[in-house]
Image: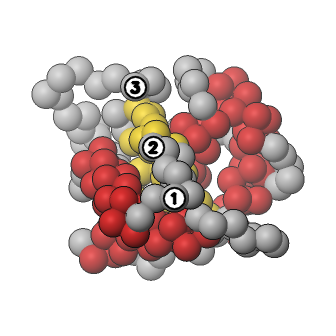
Amino acid sequence: MSLTQTPAAGMTRLPAAGAKRLYRVAGLDISLTGTGISTIGGTTRVPTAGRRADSLADRDTRLRFITGRVIEEVGTVDLVCVEGPVSYQQPGGSTWDRAGLWWRIVSSFVGREIPVAVIPPTSRAKYATGRGNARKNSVLEAAQQRYGAILPTDDEADALILRAMGLDWLGQALVSVPDGHRAALGGVRWPEMAVAS
């Protein structure tokens, strides 16, 4: 597990008198092979592998495992930011599994009445690099430079950027980003939720 922030064990960070309370936001880059998760505790990744010959029961077990780990890592938060589904020009054999995993995870938070923001991949890339068509390695490099984070994979970088976008939208940006990058917040499907002023 690679941590970007490490709060002292058992300590809760409280806002100063009259200050806005600190929002708990999670970023999720949902994937069958490596779901990236970013929370106030840091970033991590849930790696799994499957085979084309896997039975329906095996595939279901894999999806339940990933979903369970994500729910456990995220816990209770004020907002979950997930990367939206991408369109597949030539769907492969795992298209249904990817979609099923995305819906399982999103549904679990919606069912607990935790607001979910759906962030298009192009908005995530633009917020990180200023370009909506930036490749994942560019997002990884930008995340490491801007946030000073040690991120071993692009899955964790994407999750960190998604979390940063949520915090920025809530008025508690991790760091200041250029206006051109911040314009990416306008392309997100933000949930209706009460925001502390």
Disc with the residue nearer the chain's start (1 vs 3): 3
Q: Are marks 1 and 3 in contact (CB under 8 Å)?
A: no
User: How many other residues sit within 10 Å of disc 3, few (<14), some (14-19) or many (≥20)?
Assistant: few
Look at 40% across and 69% down and name the residue there.
56
Give residue 160's quadrant in the image.
top right
Give residue 111's quadrant in the image.
bottom left
Query: Residue 74: x percent and y percent?
Result: 32, 49
Residue picked out by circle 2: 48
Judge depth for marks 1 and 3 and give the one in front: 1
Distance CA(mark 1)–CA(mark 3)? 30 Å
Identify which amino acid the numbered label 1 is placed on: Ala
Disc with the residue nearer the chain's start (2 vs 1): 2
| Secondary structure of residue under mark 3 | loop
Residue picked out by circle 1: 53
| Secondary structure of residue under mark 1 | loop
Visible in this render: residue 40? yes
Q: Relative to 187, is 125 above or below?
A: above
* Label ID, residue 1: 3
Please say which color scheme the image uses. Answer: secondary structure
